[in-house]
Image (spheres, grey):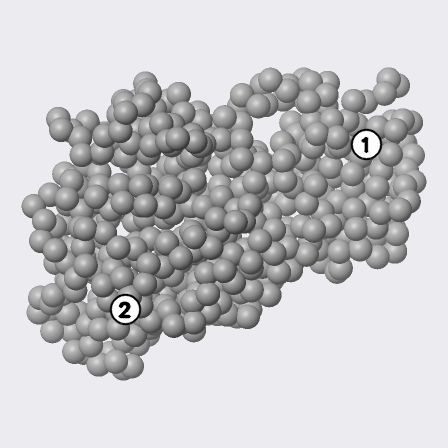
Amino acid sequence: MPGYDVTRRGFLHRTGAISAGAALASLAGRQTASASTAASATPLLQAPGPYVATRESLAAHTAPQWFRDAKFGIFIHWGVYAVPAWGVDVAYHGAEWYSYAMHISAPDQTYQHHLQTYGADFDYDRFIPRFRAERYDARAWIELIERAGARYFVLTSKHHDGFQLFPNSASDRNSVVMGPRRDLVGELFHAARTSHLKRGIYHSLGEFFNPALQTPPWNPYTKAPIPYVGYKPVQNYVDEYLHVMLRTLVEAYDPDLLWADGEHWHADLGAGPAFKPKDMDWRGDEILAYYYNQATTRPHPKEVLVNDRFEASHRDYATLEGDKSSYALRADKWEACLTLGRSWGYDTNEDPASIKSSPQIVRLLVDIVSKNGNLLLNIGPKADGTIAPWQSERLLAVGAWLDRNGSAIYDTVPWSRAADGDLRYTVSDRSFNVLGLNWPGALLTVPADLPVDAHSQIRLLGAEGHKIPFRRTGSGVDIELPDRNPNGDDYPFVLRITNS
């Protein structure tokens, strides 16, 4: 049997299933979204550069290599909803949906909880002064994210409740004018400047309640209209509010990634219409062209990207939100964004049974990466700016596993086949990696078509120092393993296959 070239380039070329050129081209993620947006006659977002707000122009942009190689990021949902910190489930009753969920008059849910805890005259915006972030240490957050092994983060700048964590001219409903009276986005981005982390910003395009969206806020118990604290009246939500905020975020913080949300249709999810009027156009193509041009024409150009929720004619990658029963190997780049528990925001009512264990998170990371995805794992800080120990402990456990096994995760590409039972595969520059979701015991038999021959060496990551014995049989390759998993019970393990 001829020797195998066990490198990312050589192996992909040899298999023919995903050749080196085809694999890297397919990973560009140039598939476009089906939605298209009409260009404005006088776009507010304009920047000189090669991109214009058309499908054809934007299609030339692809997800940068840093994102393809990063594999693991941290999502941060933080805002006024961390004050009540109470949710029931992820279907419109999570903690971050509190301001909407308290309007859904279902028994034993947020509506009743708020009435019993705070009273009928306590409007959601009365939580704003209680959102103080008095123990917020941006540098500590960055150190935790680094120790978790993440390579990027995405911080909410404005969630669906409309409260902004940054100053801007469009609204006084922000963390500098009220609440903490601090630029919470700016502090985290400044703290990350000396780190290796790429910096991302989440922004909800729509809102639960906003007079400019034809959905002014109201008291759920009396039905009376109430003020939208900090709101500055505008005639045009898109031009005078949304695009002003997005321009501020791009120019003030220079993010590497823009993550849109709240793009939904004019939906009634139990408490009246939310997010946008039926005829409103976010003009997403203008946003993308502006952002791409800012990155291209800056003194030191940089690679940036957007997700698929701008209602634009283009996306750089696909977003899969929430727990799935399984994932499929995809040629286009994608990202799974997942919670640790039920809610995205901090939730004192979390169901312990819903909280993912550290080994479960690592298994998800392995599975997602083997199928050409990134894992964006969410944390929800408390209102004072601290992160609950049960959240930080899980991040640190993932980081400890990546310290031993990260070479099979970072900077890899998927194989032509992602899975065989509990086995997953990735290809590095110098190795073919077999990642087992569960420890098989003393003997592991892998399929015969894996790149193992007499010239190969197999090592178990975390137990370096000796080669793993193996032999080919009529049905595959038998690999002898030690008595115990070096990563600990229930964690995935990694076998690295290289040429001698």
Of the 4 image quadrants, the one containing the N terminus is top right
Q: Can you identify the residue that label 2 sits on?
A: 179
In this view, the residue in front, 280 or 324, is 280
Name the disc covering residue 59, or none: none
Kindly tell me whether residue 446 is visible in this rendering.
yes
Q: Is residue 453 left or right of residue 9?
A: right
In this view, the residue in front, 438 or 178, is 178
Q: How many marks?
A: 2
Q: Callout 2, which amino acid?
A: Gly
Q: Is residue 242 left or right of residue 446?
A: left
Q: Is residue 335 above or below residue 394?
A: above
Give residue 454's quadrant in the image: top right
**What residue do we see at 60% from left, 65% from top?**
393
Whole-number angstrom distance, CA of label 1 to CA of label 2: 56 Å
**What residue do we see at 40% from left, 57% from top?**
187
Comparing marks 1 and 2, which lies closer to the viewer? Answer: 2
Q: Callout 1, which amino acid?
A: Thr
Task: Specify the farthest residue to the front.
Answer: 299
Q: Can you identify the residue that label 1 sits on?
A: 498
Q: Is residue 480 above or below residue 87?
A: above
- Classify mark 1: helix, strand or loop: strand
**What residue do we see at 13% from left, 26% from top?**
41
- Classify mark 2: helix, strand or loop: loop
Q: Which x, y percent locates residue 121?
A: 16, 78
Q: Which x, y percent locates residue 390?
A: 55, 69
Is disc 1 surrounded by few (<14), some (14 to 19) or many (20+) residues within 10 Å? many
Q: Is residue 4 above or below residue 457?
A: above
